[in-house]
Amino acid sequence: MTDLSGRHGVVVGIANKRSIAWSIAQAAANAGARLALTYQDVRLEENVQELAALTRNPLVLPCDVSHDDQLDRLFERIDREFGGLDFVVHGAAFAPKAELTAPFAQTSREGFRITLDVSAYSLIAMARRAQPLMARQGGGSIVTLTFLGSERVFPNYNVMGVAKAALEASVRYLAYDLGRDNIRVNAISAGPIRTLAATGISGFSEILKIHRDRAPLRRNIDAVEVADTAMFLIGPDSRGVTGEILHVDAGFHAVGI
Ligand code: IMJ
């Protein structure tokens, strides 16, 4: 098992106990890491505070990833409290609801801008601020979350698919840039899971059923499986892996028909 004792990490993208980012935070905390957990706004603060209380010595901080000043303050606090940083877990994504229901061709300029800003640019913004703190430790690991909708069409995923494609390309470019400081950047492409990000998506039960029927492992995946893979990408066993999109989807991505 991955040992993260004495390591420090920051996790963004926790909305509630179903969030994949929360499963990763729990796994990292259980592996001995000290964590900074962020909440997007007051609406989610109580949820994150409650969950954070289940981990040892947590730092709970506000951070809306679409605001540079909040990102600046987050990394200043982390630098002050932790004196460095070993890993970042990025699980933030958002598209305005209308963009996930109307036909893709109707995507608005503002909807495109918001979706790409929150879901893709935020990784670049975090990586740049994490870089000096990680370089000081001799390296680090950045892990983000993506979905197969970046590579193939899933009805209604729409501009989120475009944002995830930009996110995955950003993983490769960041891996190239930050590699000189021994900072690795990877993504986990998770199969469909019932999280807040999936609620209200019409036909989600059918998507889970199709995934279960067609995936080589003939089943769905859960957030704990994603967290176990995240522990590999955060920890030293993956020291030679960077710029990678690792599918944790019971093999669904490998199937043609
Ligand atoms: C989301 C929409 C359409 C199809 C979808 C999803 N499938 C899956 C998701 C097949 C698995 C969930 N997913 C992978 C996401 O990345 C979801 C992101 C998301 C969800 C919402 C819902 C509520 C809202 N904005 C959102 N923004 C991003 O208002």
Image (spheres, rainbow, N blue to C red):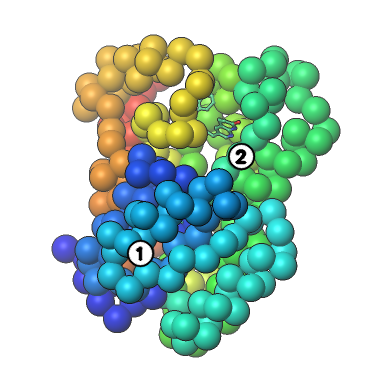
Question: 61 or 235, which lies in front?
Answer: 61
Q: Is residue 257 above or below residue 220?
A: above
First in residue order: circle 2 vs circle 1: 2
**Secondary structure type for disc 2:** loop
Number of numbered callouts drawn: 2
Nearer-the-camera pick, 91 or 138:
91
Residue marked by disc 2: 94
Q: Which quadrant is home to the N terminus? A: bottom left
Rendering quarter of residue 209: top left
Residue 7 left/right relative to 181? left
Separation of residues labelled 2 and 1 (CA atoms):
24 Å
Closer to the eye: label 2 or 1 = 2
Residue at figure coordinates x 28%, y 27% from the top left: 220
What's under tag 2, amino acid-wise? Phe
Say which element carries label 1: helix
Residue at 75% from the left image edge and 33% from the top image edge: 111
Callout 1, which amino acid? Ile
Which residue has dot 1 on it? Answer: 234
CA neighbours of label 1 inside 10 A, class few (<14), some (14 to 19), many (20+) = many
Dividing the picture into quarters, in which one does residue 93 lie?
top right
Percent from the top left, x then y, of residue 71? 64, 66
Disc 2 residue crowd, few under 14, some 14–19, many 20+, Cα 10 Å: some
Q: Is residue 162 above or below residue 72?
A: above
Foreground residue among 223 and 49? 49
In percent of the image, x 32 and y 62: which residue is there? Answer: 53
Decide if ligand 1 comes within 8 Å of the CB at mark 2. yes
